[in-house]
Image (spheres, rainbow, N blue to C red):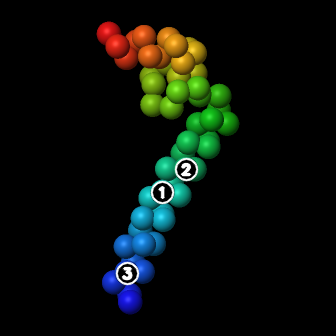
Amino acid sequence: MLRYIIPAVAVLIIVGGAIMYILRAKKKGKKCIGCPYSCSCDKSACSQKNEN
């Protein structure tokens, strides 16, 4: 039983951390998270920069 609980808790911590990162980034005004220009561009500009 314990061998199922430990991996489940680890996955929940990882997923929870990812959700918290996304929510904080959205609160700071980032439109496309992961884009180096996320605070100063709109989504169409990010997609154009990634295509080049």
Q: Give the numbered dot on residue 19.
A: 2
Alpha carbons under labels 2 and 3: distance apart: 23 Å
Outermost residue toward the bottom?
A: 1
Residue 28 higher or lower than 18, as above or below: above
Identity of the amino acid at label 3? Tyr
Residue 12 higher or lower than 27, as above or below: below
Q: Quick one: label 2 or label 3, which is nearer the N terminus?
A: 3
Q: Secondary structure at mark 3?
A: helix
Identity of the amino acid at label 1? Val
Dot 2 alpha-carbon crowd within 10 angstroms: few under 14, some 14 to 19, many 20 or more: few
Q: Quick one: label 3 or label 1, which is nearer the N terminus?
A: 3
Identity of the amino acid at label 2? Ile
Which residue, given by chain and number where applicable, does mark 1 sit on?
15
Alpha carbons under labels 3 and 1: distance apart: 17 Å
Q: Residue 37, image x and y in percent?
A: 49, 18
Q: Nearer the viewer, residue 1 or 29?
A: 1
Q: Secondary structure at mark 2?
A: helix
Residue at the image point whose x is 44% and y is 58% from the top: 14
Residue at the image point whose x is 53% and y is 58% from the top: 16
Q: Residue 46, image x and y in percent?
A: 47, 16
Which residue, given by chain and number where applicable, does mark 3 sit on?
4
Q: Give the numbered dot on residue 28.
A: none
Mark 2 near mark 1, Cβ–Cβ under 8 Å? yes
